[in-house]
Amino acid sequence: MSADGGAAALLLLADGRFPAGGHVHSGGAEAALLDGRLTGPDSLAAYAVGRLHTTGLVDAALTAAVVVGLAADCDQHGCGPGRTLRLLDAEAEARMAMAPLRESSRRLGRQLTRAAAGCWPGPTLVAVAALHPDGPHQSVALGAVANAAGIGALDAARLSLHHTLTTPLQAALRLGGLDPFAVAALAASLAPVVDEVAAEAAQAATGPIDELPCLVGPFTEIAAVEHAARTDRLFAT
């Protein structure tokens, strides 16, 4: 666990009430419900585990790599965050084949950066906000925010995975009329998976940037394109 200040920031950033814009996204759950891949608690559990080991691992590793890279920049170059952020934003971009996912990632990154800048102002968040006209990718923004808030790489990976898990679970709860107690129990039961994937992500973050995980869920990516074209959707993704 992070030091006291980082622990408090971790709780704040994990809270769904933090105004980072995530409430309008379903993590692909709405599309999965509409095309029949999500039908109840069992399929929701399988969906969540699949996301944790694919998209979740990729995003968590990128987030942790930002924390590791920014710390190294401070050690070696007097805290100049620009180069690390640009490199990792490009790596995040390369790992998203579908335009709707890239667009939503940057939209979420922009909103997170905007909200966090009022909480932990400083040069890192100024630099990440300036990365791209549409905003930084969400994983890069989260890593920069974690760095600014004093959260370490492993906890930053856990935070990323927390959102990977809870976003589709809460959306499925709202869309599918599921038992909220059962959904909460499902989230709790997957805590060991979150810890396992977080450890893998944090370890990957210490290696070469171009060797960070690069995994996808093909059905989810295809569904994201189809979902973006729908006029009757409730969630942006």
Image (spheres, rainbow, N blue to C red):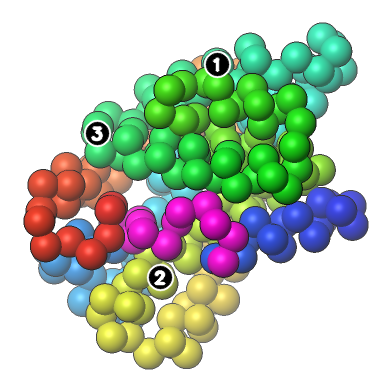
Give the residue pinned by disc 1.
Answer: 87
Instruction: Locate residue 53, reporting x and y percent.
Output: 45, 50
Name the residue rendered at 75%, 14% in the picture: 80
Which mark, residue 98?
Answer: 3
Q: What whole-number distance in Å separates the C-alpha atoms at marks 1 and 2?
A: 32 Å
Query: Magenta span: helix, strand or loop, mainly?
Result: loop
Disc 1 marks a residue whose amino acid type is Leu
Callout 3 secondary element: loop
Number of numbered discs overlaid on the protein picture: 3
Residue drawn at the location 45% of the way across and 44% of the way down: 108
Confirm whether residue 232 shows in the render.
Answer: yes
Residue 226 at least partly seen: no
> On the image, which quarter does residue 205 sit in?
top right
* Chain-order first, disc 1 or disc 2: 1
For disc 2, the marked residue is: 169
Label 1 Cα crowd, 10 Å radius (few <14 / some 14-19 / many 20+): some
| Residue 207: x %, y % from top left | 65, 23
Residue type, numbered disc 2? Leu
Q: Earlier in the sequence, mark 2 or mark 3?
A: 3
Residue located at (70% from left, 33% from top): 67
Mark carried by residue 115: none
| 26, above or below 137, in the image | below
- The magenta stretch is 17-28
Drawn side of residue 120 relative to residue 65, left or right: right
